[in-house]
Image (tube, rainbow, N blue to C red):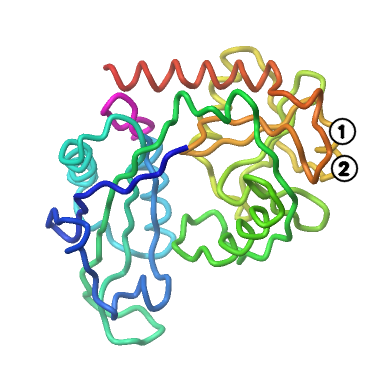
């Protein structure tokens, strides 16, 4: 999948060439990781999953007591403008809000304007060739903090976990705590057993994935049973199917876990059906 950063970047009210886009070394996002981020897919030149994105961003900001940098409609307008200026047809818009620039003190500074940056990346979302073959994952220890429900820019644990997975020849890692899979390094984790999709319930231990939320809605409408519960690595190895979801993968079959083939080693029928139903949903949204 391609991942090409486009040329125009947004920084605090300005649209700049990527080489000119700068933030202060005193920005709390840089110093403390004191901020949150979001990723929104772009299909056929349009933002999709926007309502759920705004709701999750609003929650993350609220949990950290960071003010919105502008109205929600203005925020969407920034991203739409970036899509137009970069002539993006398919890919993602990344945006990040931090508490802003202040002296280096651990407590919240008073009356500090937030920092908002955003940029686009071209990616093949709908016709990603990995969707035809599936991907391999490996399990890796979950080293993260206890507020994983906040989409924080503190991603060092995920960086280490992703590098661990890549160094072992996998495309993704599944993080494990006390023998149970929490979630993928950059995705939500699912298994399928006897026609039922199993995924961990929401709590402070996992990120409330937008694709997860949508997949559950789609599955319920399609009479595909969903069981929201924790599952073990041992269960995953015995599953009929496994898959992940994220802004950049939509849904993606997992055909191998720790070198063990899942099912027949090919993307399964329920995974394929959910992917097609999701694609239809976001295409319809994009063409509204």
* Residue at x-position 73% and y-position 23%: 266
Q: Is residue 25 left or right of residue 106?
A: left
Is 13 located above or below residue 110 in the figure?
above
Q: Secondary structure at mark 1?
A: loop
- Which residue appears at 20% of the width and 62% of the height? 19
Label 2: element kind:
helix
* x and y percentages locating residue 148 in the rendered image: 57, 57
- Find residue 224 and report its horizontal and vertical position in percent: 67, 17
Contact between labelled residues 2 and 1, with CB atoms less than 8 Å apart: yes
Is the residue marked by circle 2 packed among few (<14), some (14-19), or many (20+) residues within 10 Å?
few
Name the side, left or right, on which 25 lies relative to 183: left
Image quarter of residue 115: bottom left
Tell me where the magenta segment starts and ends, as one range. Answer: 42-50
From this viewpoint, which residue is outermost toward the top?
222
Asked whether, in this view, residue 28 is left or right of residue 115, the answer is right
User: Could you tell me residue 102's position as x and y percent?
Assistant: 26, 81
| Badge 1 density bin: few <14, some 14–19, many ≥20, Cα 10 Å | some
Q: Nearer the viewer, residue 26 or 54?
A: 26
Quarter of the C terminus within the rendering: top left
Identify the residue under disc 2.
234
Residue 235 or residue 68, whichever sits in front: 235
Does the magenta run of residues contain 213?
no
Q: How many marks?
A: 2
Q: Quadrant of residue 34?
A: bottom left
Residue 153 sits above or below residue 71 on the image:
below
Q: Which residue is mark 1?
A: 238
Instruction: Residue 239 in the image: state x and y as whole percent.
Output: 82, 30
Residue drawn at the location 50% of the way across and 28% of the way down: 128
Could you give the CA–CA distance between mark 1 and mark 2, rounded to whole angstroms?
A: 7 Å
């Amino acid at each position: 999948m391609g991942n090409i950063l486009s040329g125009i970047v947004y920084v605090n009210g300005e649209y700049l060439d990527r080489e000119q886009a700068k933030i202060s070394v005193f920005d709390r996002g840089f110093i403390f990781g004191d901020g949150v981020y979001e990723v929104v897919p772009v299909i056929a030149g349009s933002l999709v999953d926007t309502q759920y994105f705004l709701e999750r961003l609003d929650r993350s900001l609220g949990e950290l007591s960071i003010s919105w940098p502008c109205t929600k409609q203005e925020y969407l307008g920034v991203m739409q403008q970036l899509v137009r200026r970069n002539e993006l047809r398919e890919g993602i818009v990344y945006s990040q809000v931090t508490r802003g620039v202040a002296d280096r003190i651990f407590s919240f500074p008073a009356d500090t304007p937030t920092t908002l940056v955003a940029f686009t990346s071209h990616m093949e979302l709908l016709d990603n060739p990995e969707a035809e073959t599936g991907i391999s994952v490996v399990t890796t220890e979950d080293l993260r903090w206890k507020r994983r429900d906040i989409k924080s820019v503190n991603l060092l644990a995920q960086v280490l976990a992703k590098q661990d997975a890549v160094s072992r020849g996998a495309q993704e890692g599944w993080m494990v705590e006390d023998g149970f899979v929490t979630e993928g390094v950059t995705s939500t984790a699912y298994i399928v057993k006897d026609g039922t999709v199993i995924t961990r319930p929401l709590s402070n231990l996992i990120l409330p994935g937008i694709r997860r939320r949508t997949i559950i809605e789609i599955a319920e409408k399609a009479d595909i049973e969903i069981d929201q519960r924790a599952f073990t690595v041992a269960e995953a190895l015995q599953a009929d199917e496994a898959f992940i979801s994220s802004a950049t993968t939509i849904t993606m079959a997992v055909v191998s876990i720790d070198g063990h083939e899942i099912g027949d080693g090919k993307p399964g029928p329920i995974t394929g059906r959910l992917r097609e139903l999701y694609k239809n949903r976001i295409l319809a949204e994009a063409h509204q």
